[in-house]
Image (cartoon, rainbow, N blue to C red):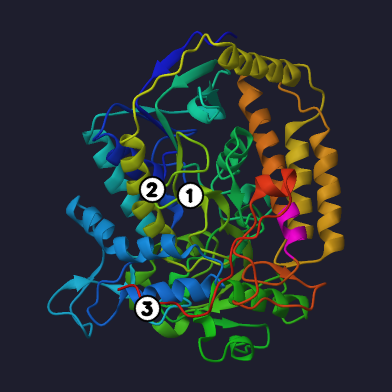
Amino acid sequence: MLADNVTDCHVLVVGSGGAGCRAAVEASKYGDVILLSRSVTGKGGCTTMAEGGYNAVLNPKDSCSSHFEDTIRGGAYLNDRELVKILVEEAPERFADLMNWGAVFDLSCDCDGFEGTHPAQRHFGGQKFNRTCYSGDRTGHEIMATLMEKVRGGDIRVIQEVTVIDLLTETLSGGEVRVCGAVGLDRDGNMTVFRCDAVVLATGGTGQIYDVCTNCATGNGQGYAIGYRAGAELIDMEMVQFHPTGAVYPYDARGRLITEAVRGEGGYLKNSRGERFMAKYDPERMELSTRDVVARSIATEIMEGRGTDKGGVYLDVTHLGADVIEERLPMMLAQFLNFGVDIRKEPMEVAPTAHHMMGGLRITPECKTTIKGLFACGEVTGGIHGANRLGGNSLADTQVFGKRAGEFAGKSVMHRALMNTPEIVGQLAAEELRFNKFLNGHDSVAEIKERLRKTMWENVGIFRTREELETALAEIEELSEMSPKADSPAVLAECCVLEDMLTVAALVVRGALLREESRGAHVRKDIVQDWTPETSPYGHTYQSIYREGIERIGAENEDGGDLQ
């Protein structure tokens, strides 16, 4: 299984969701680009599944300062403010790109502040203004269809069904480490090497480490793990967002996303007594509170015995009328009709589900990670969303930072590594040993994954305690000592993915143990102390946690500041 297959390019983009495709389109302006996908390009990522919308300041009565303040406040002041400033200021420009490339968004002509026909914008939680642009409840699908047309029409080489299992690095003359390529496995278990001047990681999130999640099958955290092994820093990995509304039944649909657009259009949350219970938790914003608040409120109602027989609460849109539901929520209507529920006549049953990772690779405004030659964009990055992401900011994030990652990676100096150096040869030999270990393993990959997902769901959920976190960590360490078996070379990639899932799960748990406060999506029931913007740390640097201790960076003040 020698790496005879070496493929060269200027920029290698790993991940073909919204961020990866946007990065590839931009990077192709500067040299030859390979867009690498674990699945079928444009269909396997989570962008396609994003239903709600794209946040952008378009209405003259809205402002970037307001969007900035909402994002910082929603993120519990843990956000990297420079990244947030870029997000809110450039989101309208990237939205215009999509429109100019042919994306079809809903339009309106009756909104105060606009003149004439304009993109329709709905209200999402935690925001003071209607700024979420949408295409019915299939916004992500529309964005991906548009991006795929740009990819097909550009000078981009697309390679599908290859799993990147590690990054290649070389040590430069001054001692600095540089990412110079990647190692992948195709569907038959054949190893291939990609040599490049820059790598862009756009691998998405890690919801699949939980038993119930909204993520696609490839949302298992590989980008975090391979970036970490290469030496890149990660921040805030304890900040896992649980979307308030995932499907409760049927069993094989548990956790499937019920878009925030349902609440944005005026849906009511009710408990088994018929009470709109959000009045107890956030009487001002009600169902349109931030996701962390709504998820905790639903979980509390269920735990205190006011949930449904199926273990959820009701999400009711029957009062909106059939016409509104059919026009603005067609995907939700179709989905629940398949479940035997007509949401025009009866409520949905929903419960929180693992959804989005706010932590990830630390990046600069140029999307550079802390290791030379490695760029990142999309959900694999940390800092933009702080301790809780606002709905609608994720799709904007993919386009704003996807464009930036592609641009700055594309501007990288051309410098191809030599594949026959002892350093590179040693890394490839280590991969061969890893494969042999899997081929001679004796433990079921499926069983290890199942145990991991259950322990994360039961012990590292919405509410956390030190005892539960330590239980999860002990289980993860035990699972990491097991020997997953690859029955054939084609299963090698699954073994590598499993190792990455265990690595990421350990990062999440260790971060949760270290953050002894309740903040945003991270709630420690065993700690009374709560955070304040003046005293709580910016974030944790994970390399420091394991090697040098916790690095605390600055302190935030509550004032959102002026963007002008």
> Which residue is denoted by mark 1 in the rendering?
363
Main secondary structure of the magenta stretch: helix
**Residue at the image position 77 percent from the left and 80 percent from the top:** 305
Magenta stretch holds residue 510: yes
Q: Which is more toward the observer, 312 or 63? A: 63
At label 1, which amino acid type do we have?
Answer: Ile
Callout 1 crowding tier (Cα within 10 Å): few <14, some 14–19, many ≥20: many
Q: Which mark is residue 66?
A: 3
**Residue 130 falls in image quadrant:** bottom left
**Residue at the image position 70 percent from the left and 72 percent from the top:** 518
Magenta stretch holds residue 447: no
Q: Which is more toward the observer, 548 or 387? A: 548
**Residue 356 falls in image quadrant:** bottom right
Mark 2, secondary structure of its residue: loop
- The label nearer to you, 2 versus 3, is 2
Check contact, mark 2 vs mark 1: CB within 8 A. yes
**Residue 229 falls in image quadrant:** top right
Q: CA distance from mark 2 to mark 3?
A: 24 Å
Check contact, mark 2 vs mark 3: CB within 8 A. no
- The label nearer to you, 1 versus 3, is 1
**Residue at the image position 56 percent from the left and 58 percent from the top:** 358
For residue 201, say whether it is visible.
Answer: no
At label 2, which amino acid type do we have?
Answer: Glu
Callout 3 crowding tier (Cα within 10 Å): few <14, some 14–19, many ≥20: some
Q: Is residue 192 depicted above or below 273 in this figure?
A: above
Q: Which is more toward the observer, 333 or 242? A: 242
List x then y, in percent, for residue 309: 72, 73
Question: Which residues fall within the magenta stretch?
Answer: 509-515
At label 3, which amino acid type do we have?
Answer: Ser
Q: Which mark is residue 473?
A: none
> Which residue is denoted by mark 2 in the rendering?
366
Left or right placement of residue 89 versus residue 71 in this view: left
